[in-house]
Image (cartoon, rainbow, N blue to C red):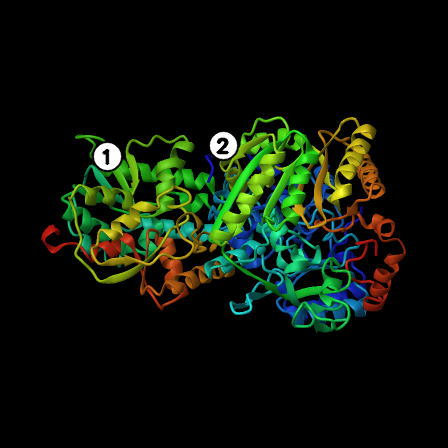
Amino acid sequence: MAPARRWTTEEIITACRFCWMCRHVCTVGNVTCKESHTPRGKTLLLYSMLAEMNIPEQEIADCVYKCALCYRCMENCVSAIDVPQVMLNTRAEMVREGSPPSEIQNAYDSLMKERGSALSLPYKTREHGLDRVGELPDKAPIILFGGRATYTYTPGALSGASEILKAARIDHTILGQQGWSGYEFYEIGYLDDAIHTAKETLELLENVIDDSSGPAYVITLDPSDNWALGELYRQWGLDVPFNVIDFSSYVKQLVDSGEVSFRDADIEVCYHDPCHLGRLQRVFTQPRELLSSISGLVIKEMHWNREQAYCCGGHIRASDKSIATGAVLDLVKEIKATQAPVVVTACPTCCDSLKQADNVFDVYHIAEFLAQYLRSNSTG
Amino acid sequence: MTVTTPAEMTYPLIMGISELQNLVGRENVSLTEADRFAYSCDYYWVPRVWIDRGRMPNLPDVVVHVENSSQLSRILKIANQYRIPVVPWGGGSGSQGGALPIKGGIVVDLKKMNKIVEINPESMTYTAECGIIHQVLEWELNRCGYSTMHLPASTSCATLGGYLAHRGSGVASSKYGKIEDLIVTMEVVLPDGTVINTPPVPRHAAGPDLNQLFIGSEGTLGIITKATMKMFPLPEKRVFRAFIFKDLSSAIEAGRIVMTNGATPSILRLYDPVETRERLEKILGIEKEGAYMVYGYDGPSQLVDVQESIARQVFSEFADEDLGPELGELWWDRRFHFYFPPYCLDLPKAFGTMDTVATYDKIIPVYHAMKEAVETNFPNAVFIAHFSHWYHWGCMMYDRFILDEVPDDPQEAITLYNSIWDVGIKAALKAGGVLNEHHGIGLKLGQYMKDQYKEAFRVIEALKSSLDPNRIMNPGKMGL
């Protein structure tokens, strides 16, 4: 991918409305085969709005939400044009104007209900196996951040990550309640709710962060949360008084410094690059190096990996489950071709998509997976 | 213009659409204006400027996503029953308006017919459904160690069927041939719904070549649904070298020699001095006066070495500067950059690719005739060309005119645009050129088909009348 230059939304619409060069990699376009679902089709429709051509806005809104936010178009564009950002901006505008598709409004309502109950329950009372985490201090310089997707789909990742940090004698804690990054609202266009959620989460974090002895770190287990906390919050004008790092990158440092190590294992593993960790945040090597630190473990790469990895469709579930299913089935086909019995990824949403799609292979979040192989003499 | 919406449809159309829904399922029939709008514009400049100026283009009445040839057969029967126009749509990347639904009707999107049916290493062929996007097909063959060696810039968006229907060619055509040279056999759904297969081999003496009848017919005589094509091993070695020629004729002569002395390259590409300056400087960073030319050889290592050394000797004799392999390799690495924003030609510019082919003795006169005609009659227009597909007898010129600005009024803009085309094409035909080498005829060039074919056009018309008596297939294209 070429170094990105900031294109304005209008420049992107103008540049992409008659350009076909990324169609072959569009996750949604490849599933539905509809022209209106490709980056060209969507930007052409957005242009029709600018030109006041009177195509029903509800129909255009429907197409704008038919984007998996997989960033494959951007990756394969010589100019690295950020079409997904245009979709996100347009969604926010459509929500502001009260015109998102009905399934998105339903998704929002359901998120709001979920949010209410998430805030009302402390984590230890939830039936997520989080008791394995054990006692943690009220405050610490390192915070393990489990967002909505982590708690919902891979709570074991949170406990696994905590076990690994304990083994490395890292003074850490987790939030007393589910922290949501706000990305879950942001991706469906509810920007005000995203920012409101972000502010709440910052308050929760400030209550548990101990930065008296140096800069604090928030370690994320969900790439979308990592993007929100590490990048979007600043774009939203919020003060982020801590460093943000994804789990794989952080633990890789611990492995490199010898603070944690893993048992040998004779196992073949396929690693799936999450779109938001790989293409969006360029974290490709750290998870692989972590896995490779397990002696005897063999990584069976998919043919399409790293920058060109397939998308699990997780971020389009809210608007179209059938497209999400089509996308993950394409990914499953690639995984099966590796013949690896285990799939490891670094994203709770990817884990859930893959678990729902097939049961031929076992699926693990990388934190959950690595915790199984912690050296017994280093578990603390 | 009036846009046909479901509420304004005639009852035969409504009956036809309801039968289509029963046939392929509602999920495969799009009636929304947004979906139909996305099929109203292909790569052709005219619908682009029309939409850019806020005008609604001609929309299809319905878009149908077809999953197999049996469904397509029944769709065409329904269309015949109700006399509904049918426009096949692969990638929509044709630059002459071939996929535009100018008379409404049914757009049949073939991209769900995207399976690779067989890869046959023994016969070195593959068989695929024609809706497959070509890059996807190429990648799948690459995984098995093979290549289509059909490598055009539109590979990311065009389909196999689109290449066949428009007689496409890729950058390696000088060695591997154009799409019509790569075909082995094909399945075609005729306008009346009959599904036929051409003979299983492309070389025989049993009458006319049916493959070649449908290749380039642009959906006017039927829809190509499946094809068996040649494939090649991935090259063991690939080398490039670039040169600068002060004189275009010398470059053509160097190309002619290697195309006829047994050292046929896979890539041979010559940019005229204006395109070298205007386009290559931006993309390759070459700041040279003169014409840039690159050759590329691929295949078994020993063969590549011998052929390349012959070519280097020839080019050294005619070229003014040897730029070495690096600037040839850079061209190969960036060969598709020309078609991405911001490098590609796009509005507000007007541009047209006339795409002319001629024998070696005529190609330079054709170039000068077209350049002079365009630039004399339209002083604001720039004429550029590259010569990119070479044969034993001549070569193809990818010639384009570019206007930085056109009138705001789309009617005036289109009139001006057509005038430039008209002048350029007439000059080409008069100088002995033939249109159109690999972008198809479509809507744009249909008017010149009779000039080019003269009495022979009766053969094409007779085929059309016989195969498609209700004239439902891609109406208004190819001069039919």
Establish if B248 lies above or below B123.
above
Dot 2 or dot 1, earlier in sequence? 2
Q: Which residue lies furthest to the left in this view?
A: A377
Establish if B375 lies above or below A292.
above
Q: How many marks?
A: 2
Residue at image mark 1: A216
Indicate left or right for B129 with B42 as reference: left
Whether residue B388 is visible to the viewer of this picture, yes or no, is no
The front one of B77 and B3 is B77
Amino acid bearing label 2 = Arg
Image x and y of residue B293, in percent: 61, 37
Residue at image mark 2: A5
**Quick one: SS at disc 1?**
loop
The front one of B44 and B334 is B334
**Quick one: SS at disc 2?**
loop
Image x and y of residue A241, in percent: 29, 31
Same chain for mark 2 and mark 1? The answer is yes
Task: Specify the quadrant of the image occupied by residue B287.
Answer: top right
